[in-house]
Structure formats: C-alpha cells, structure tokens
Image: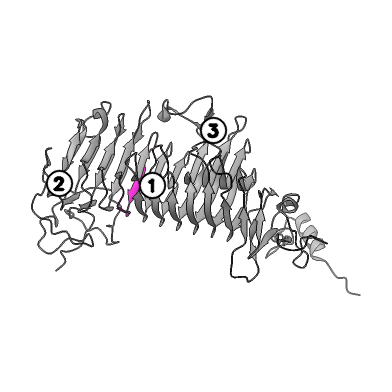
Amino acid sequence: MRHRVTAAALAALTAAAGLTLAGPSAAQAAPAGRTFHVDCDASPQGATGSRQHPWTTLAEANARTYGPGDRLLFKRGATCTGTLAPTGAGSPRAPFTIADYGSGPDRAELDGAGAHDTVLLSNTQYVHLRALEITNADHPGSERNGVRLLLTDYGVARGFDISGLYIHDVRGGDFKTVSGSSAIHIAVEGTAKASRYDGLDIGDNRIEDVDREGIYFKSTFSRRDLVGGQQDPDVYPGEWTPSTGVRIHHNTLTSLAGDGMKLDTTSGARVDHNRVDGFQLRSPSANAGIWTFNTDDTTVEYNEVSGGGNTHDGMSFDADGASQNTVFQYNHSHDNKGGFLLICPYDGAKTIGTVARYNVSRDDGARLIQNCWGPILGTEIYNNTFHNKEQIPGYLVQDDAGSPATTQHELSVRNNVFVSEGTGGYAFKNPTPGLAFDHNAFYGIDMTRPDTGGVTADPRLRTDFRLGAGSPALAAGAVIENNGGKDYFGDRLKPGAPNIGAYAGRGVR
C-alpha cells in the first residue's frame, strides 16, 4: 500500500532531519495576496471589493488592513474623493500594490478635494504606488500634499516604489515644513524612535502645477554638528538618521511654485534623468531646481533644469547647508533667472566636498555661481561649459560677504569654458581669498582675477557645446584626478591634459 506524503509533511520530516529541500517550499513561496477593486462611480449596493461588486468609497478602502501580495486597484476613468490612507504592509517578496484596473482611456483619479493629503502612506513598508492620477486643488492656500509618505517613531521602513503617477493641481500654501506642501512629500516625524527609509524609488512620474514643492524630504531626526544653527532643535531634536537607498529618476516636473526637488537627511541618494521646467514661479521664499540639505554622498546627474522664475535663488542646483560630498555632473541647465549653481552654508553650517563637473549651462542669468557666507570646504567646479547670449549674468561668481570662513583654495574653479556673446561682462562680488581660478577659458568677458594657465582667445564653442577644430581650449586644461571618467557627451576621458570645458573629444570641423 502506498502512502502519499504531503509537501507540509515532507518539509517537517526534512527539517527534523536537518535537511534542506531543493526548490521553494510552501513557507518560502511569496504570498498570493488578495485583490480589491474600487470604482467610485459604481452603485454602492452589494459592494464587496470584488471586480463585479467594487467598493465605491475611499472609506471602504481605508477600513481594510492589507498584507503581503495584496492589491488595491482603482477603476480607470472613475474619480474617488477624499484621502486614501490604507493600513498594513507588504513584504520583501510580496509588496502591497496600489494601482489601476480596467481598459478605459482615462486614468483612475484620486482627488483630495482640499484634504491635507490625497494619498497618505503612514508607518508602512513594501508598498508600490503606481499609475494613478492624483490632484488636490480645492480650498487653495492650506498645507496639503498629493502623496505623503510618513514615518512616526517607526524605525526602518523599506521597499517603496512610487512610479507612473500623474500628480497635478496640488494647491497648497507657501509651506516648507515636515508635513507639507508637496506633490510627493517624504516625511519622518516623532521623537521617541529614530526612523528612516531604506529603499525608496521615485520614478517615471509627471508632476504639474504644484504649490509649493515638487518632491520634498524632511526629517525630525536630522541633528548633527554640520547643520549648525540652521534647524530649531525643538523641532528637529533627533540625531541624524539618514534615509538610504533613495533614487529619484525619469520624473518630469513643470509649473512649480517653489522647489523642484529637495533632498534632506539622506545618504547615498541618486537623482538622475529628471526634467524640471518651471520652478520658483509663485513663491516669495527662496527656491531652487534640485538641491540638497543635510545630506551625504548625493549624486545629481543627467538632469535637465530650466525655467527658474526669479533671482531669489532660482538657480538649477544647490548644495546647501550641511551638504557633504555632493556631485553635480552631466546635467543641462538653461534659461534660469537665478543662475546655475549655489553653494550655501550659513548660520553655523558647513558645506563640504561639493563637485560640479562636466555640466553645460546656457543663458542662465543673474550669477552663474553663488557662494553664500560661511565655510565652503573642498569645493571643485571644473570642466563645465557656460554659454550666455540672451541672458548676461551680473556676476560670474557672486561671493556673499566674502565667505570669511573659507580658507585658501577651498573653492576651486578650473578647466571651465565661459563664453559671453552679449554686451557687458561678468563681475565678482566680495571675492573671498579662498576662491581660486586656473586653466579656464574666458571669452567676451573682462576677467579681473588671476587665471593661471587660462585661455582668452575664442574657444570656438559650437551651439552643441562641443569645441571646433583649432580651438585653443583643446588639451589645454589641468589634469584632475578622480574626474568621473567621462565627459558630458559620454566620451571616455583619456590620460594627459584634458580639454577645457565639458567636451573631451577632438575639435569638430
């Protein structure tokens, strides 16, 4: 007589014998999860969350606790009003997914209708939020968000994927706080338990018409010596606990009242292949395109930033207070009234190890580079190309109050091409002794500071930022170690003296 051994029984026998089964066991398999449907345009009678009888309100969706592998799906073409605030969490192998269903031509829409948040993901992890349309325009001027991720005395939250969203008309006021106002707001609150994100991917989202922030990070666990007096210790009392595994990529952000993206209290974040067009448009406060504050080891690359609306900052990039080892590379900046780059410690903070290399800038105004008062240490700005024709900056470098805490050669500007085709020239404001120039190409500019090894003849800069044949900037730069290995165009950097500017190839005929 044969005896049939079940998978569970076999697993128990092998475990007792100290053996391991080949292949996934039932305990190892990812949970199948449950699927719930929401159609806020459907009849509420008999609503069970099935496809045939979907839930019809966000209150019904919020009443369920979700687990690994669960899916909460919203009907394409239907609009739900209020705040989606689900509870529960996914797992590493089986995230909790919030997305859409159906074949309608229009997206599933969630409308906050003036609520503080349209989507609130609080004290959860392993959540994928995808493919929805999110808006929050009613009763403008109050603090509000499109999507808010929130940790409160939670610890480490992992496994977030925020992708494919269309977020628009989030009409908040001019708030820049832990709790709002943003299209996507990443917040850590509380005082009892240090909390952070580990593994947060924000990609392929479209963000339009937002007051004030596009993508914004803030944490109460952010206190360290580098930040100085920039943060009120009563509001931000926790020791610096940075979020890790953060990537923000392939997003498009347009028509923003304030900042495009601000990273705060992160370590090792990467910001790449984003398009920011139109920021600092409706805010009386200072705002920038993409900037860091109180961060370590951030890489900002392959982004295009334009349309900075005024000169209250209004530049593409900013390494702000307590930013350490921030790299801006391979970016395209243009038509920003505020300029290209801000390096800005103040109120006792320090900015350390900023690198800006192999970027291109066209018609950025007011000032191309600005350094605020305070310690700007180990900063290198090299092999960038600046071309101004329509906008002629008042300052090549705007040195605020001379940055008296900056020591000699802590801010180095070298191997850059600066071309001005308009009337007037660039000037310097309160130039600090620590600001050093060498091996730059200045053309159409009355250079008033020493520029050892520099070039003043026409560098034959083409409209595509390459150098023409016979350019005096070819192979005329200073050798720089740890230079990133390639130029703006992706060409490999070769040994020996580099070109001046963002192009490393041969002269183009």
Q: Which residues are magenta?
A: 324-337
Q: Earlier in the sequence, mark 3 or mark 2?
A: 3
Which amino acid type is marked by label 2? His
Quadrant hosting residue 323 = top left
Q: Is residue 464 above or below residue 262?
A: below
Residue neighbourhood size for the residue with mark 2, other residues' Cα within 10 Å, grouped as few (<14), some (14–19), many (≥20): many
Q: Residue furthest right?
A: 1
Label 3 belongs to which residue? 220
> Of the residues shown, which amino acid type is indicated by label 1?
Gly
Q: CA distance from mark 1 to mark 3?
A: 23 Å
Label 3 sits on what residue type? Thr
- Residue 463 colored magenta? no
Q: Quadrant of the N terminus?
A: bottom right
Residue 388 is left or right of residue 122, and the answer is left
Marks 3 and 2 close (CB-CB < 8 Å) = no
Q: Element at badge 2? A: loop
Task: Give the Cα distance between marks 1 and 2.
Answer: 29 Å
Q: Nearer the viewer, mark 3 or mark 2?
A: 3
Q: Nearer the viewer, residue 439 or 116?
A: 116
Residue 157: x and y in percent read 60, 45
Foreground mark, 1 or 2, reads 1
Residue hosting label 2: 439
In this orientation, does residue 397 appear?
Answer: yes
Q: Residue at x 13, y 59 (%)?
A: 460
Identify the mark nearer the N-term, 1 or 3. Answer: 3
- Residue linked to disc 1: 289
Q: Residues within 10 Å of mark 3 (few under 14, many from 20)?
A: many
